[in-house]
Amino acid sequence: RILTNKAYIGLREVNKSRTEVDVVKAAWPAIVGLDAFNQVQERLGNNKNKYKPIEWKKYPYPMTELLVCGECGKKLGGKSAHGRNKKHHYYGHPRQLNSDGVTHLQRCRLERVRAERIEDIVLKSLKKLIQTPGLVEHWLEIYTKSTHSEIPALEAKVKAMDSEIESKSKRVQNLVSRIAELPAYIPTDIFYQQIKETNQKIQELKQAKQELQSKSITLKGQAIDKDGLVDKIKNTLAKLEETPVERRRPLYANLIQFAELHPTKIKVGVIAPEIGQYKATGTGEVPGKESDFQNFVGEPGKVIDLVRRGGSASVTIGARQGT
């Protein structure tokens, strides 16, 4: 509680009984710096779901930090509870020790899931993906179309940034000319400040433009290796079946980027190799950047959604699995 107490940074929480807590400046001075306090909060948040050594627990929870709540976006960590006859293992939401005024009152519809069951559902959805004729090809086609459809918008943004950079560059030139024409007795500090701020904005625009151009180039050259993807899934599934549960975490992480859970559906982000990468090594360890091809588990034969996550296209695949 000491590490999360805002009193040490000179703040006080009031009206905790309401849905939103008010934070006001305290009468006492801060004895801990704000940057240090924020770094501690970030470290504490990461520690909540941090994968723990096998010897620390009886069930290893191999999908820790791969499971994500579809409502709040929080990563789910391993938890356990005692039933009448045995101990049950879950993936559940992390919870703050002290009230933040919101999360202690609100709960997601899918608060926790049985560990063994959700792991089995994810594996079954991957098996269905490669066993159903034409399913991989169908969703790869959708993935390709959605990826290419993003390119014109990116190019339009780059063009707009070029115009804004040109406009601001002219403004800097005008300010320089204005300073040169001013009488010596007129202060020029305000003009130099405007030039500095405008130049800084120009650099930010150039950096953002470069990032968009890089993303556009990546999308143009991004082509998923269908055979490599199928081989990778097959090999990973085979290894998972012959590997003890406490040793499965690296295998999951090599294939699955995330599994987003909803009350009636699951979205699985699969790390798919680009053409030439998988066959070059002959193993499941694919060097270089890979595409994020997402397998969505929802209602039978129905496209549930088409979204964006981390700059990669999200493709939905129909299949029914509850949690």
Image (tube, rainbow, N blue to C red):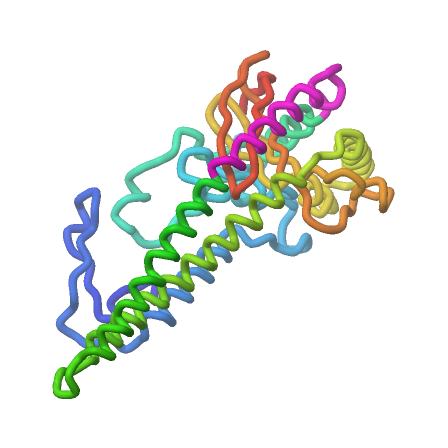
Does the stretch in magenta take in 173? no
| Viewer-side residue, 142 vs 198 | 198
27 w.r.t. 242: above or below: below
Looking at the picture, how far across and down is residue 302, in whole percent? Answer: 55, 14
The residue drawn where x is 36% and y is 70% is 35
Q: Quadrant of residue 241?
A: top right
The residue drawn where x is 21% and y is 42% is 19
Q: Is residue 249 left or right of residue 276?
A: left
The answer to whether residue 89 is visible is: no
322 w.r.t. 50: above or below: above
Count of residue discs: 0
Query: Residues in magenta?
Result: 127-153
| Viewer-side residue, 21 vs 159 | 159
Q: Quadrant of residue 193?
A: bottom left
Q: Can you name the residue that lies furthest to the top here?
A: 301
Q: Is residue 160 left or right of residue 139?
A: left
The answer to whether residue 53 is visible is: yes
Looking at the picture, how far across and down is residue 307, in whole percent? Answer: 49, 31
| Predominant secondary structure, magenta span | helix
| Viewer-side residue, 65 vs 134 | 134
Quadrant of the image containing the C terminus: top right
The residue drawn where x is 76% and y is 46% is 286
Q: Can you name the residue that lies furthest to the front here?
A: 181
Looking at the picture, how far across and down is residue 216, in whole percent? Answer: 56, 43
